[in-house]
Amino acid sequence: MSDASPSRSAKSRWQHLASPAAFMRLAVLIAICPILGLFGKQHWFLDLFNHLQAQYFAALLIISVVLGIWRKPKHAAISVAALLIPTARLAPLYQSTNPGPQGPELRVASYNVLTSNQRYGDAVRWTLETDPDFIYFTECHRKWIRELDALANAFPYATEMSYSSNFGFAFRSKHPIESVKVHPTGDLELPLLEVRIRTPHGLVTVFGCHPVPPMNDFWASERDHYLAELQRLSSAAEGHCVILGDLNATRWSHHMKPILTSFSDTQEGHGYSATWMRKNWLVTIPIDHILTRGFQGTKTRATGPDLGSDHRPVVAELVW
């Protein structure tokens, strides 16, 4: 009798956790999260709830299906209704963005290498195989910059800056660089790169970016100031324009909205693909961006392989 009682108790707890009522409570809890994100402009912590739209969608879809299997239509209907916000947020990523008449193409790439990552050769090989017209690397210290010199023959035009922490960069281009500006941004004076590239099809202004992650009040304020400065500078740039880098924000962050009013997100029409922390699906999110203005559209957009960083590279083919 003493052995059977704990077993029955454990079974009872499991049945309680796997009950329709428990799944309904879980659905309500998850549904609250994207609603909290709607108030992200008021506080940086609430804005964090905007980044996990794919996770909300997947969890609520599973709960809806399970409740349907259990023949709990009212419970399932509530769970399905809770899907509306994440569905609306994700839908543009799956809507076709046919660029129309085909023109010359420009391939661009960005990769946060991770300062502690030592797979230098893998990054060099991937870049040569991908063959972009230009690429922006973030988190580059002196060692990374030296190792990326292996790209010099294929990408003879370069500008770089090592930094005391994780905010150095290297920019490599096949085409001549006409001008370089590095804007020290915020109290931390993090570099915001602005370069003008003369491609065979015309001039392109490129912004290479990497603000701090919004992990506390000060860092969130610095990230938001950086994005606001990026919006100001990019709005003043004439002609074709590309924004590259780890923005430490997804497209759903309130502080990305001003940028996306004038720039196109190359993710749209090419599906959801997270770039950071891909080994942990609970927190993996798309914070590495390629944003454009002045191009007809995006022919292809892809997330690259694991090259040793906690980020994946991104590459897009733009139609001129």
Image (spheres, rainbow, N blue to C red):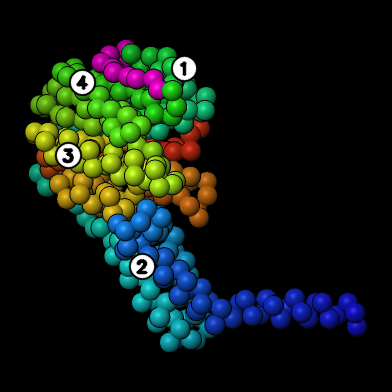
Identify the residue at image location x=32%, y=62%.
39
Which of marks 4 and 2 precedes in the sequence?
Answer: 2
Q: Kindly identify which residue carries mark 4.
A: 180
User: Residue 53 at what x, y percent from top left?
Assistant: 38, 59
- Tell which of 183 and 127 is nearer to you: 183
Closest to the observer: 15 or 218? 218
Can the viewer see residue 17 in this picture?
yes
Instruction: Compute the Cα span from label 2 to label 4.
Output: 42 Å
Q: Are marks 2 and 4 in contact (CB under 8 Å)?
A: no
Specify the quadrant that holds the C terminus: top left
Q: Amino acid at mark 1?
A: Lys
The range drawn in magenta is: 153-163
**First along the sequence among labels 1 and 4:** 1
**Badge nearest the viewer, 3 or 1:** 3
Local packing at callout 3 (Cα closer than 10 Å; few below 14, some 14-19, many 20+) is few
What's the mark number on residue 35?
2
Cα distance in 3D space between marks 2 and 3: 29 Å
Q: In the figure, is residue 2 to the left or right of 93?
A: right
Q: Which residue is mark 1?
A: 143
Q: Nearer the viewer, mark 3 or mark 4?
A: 3
**Mark 3 — residue?**
232
Q: CA distance from mark 2 to mark 1?
A: 44 Å
Q: Are marks 1 and 4 in contact (CB under 8 Å)?
A: no
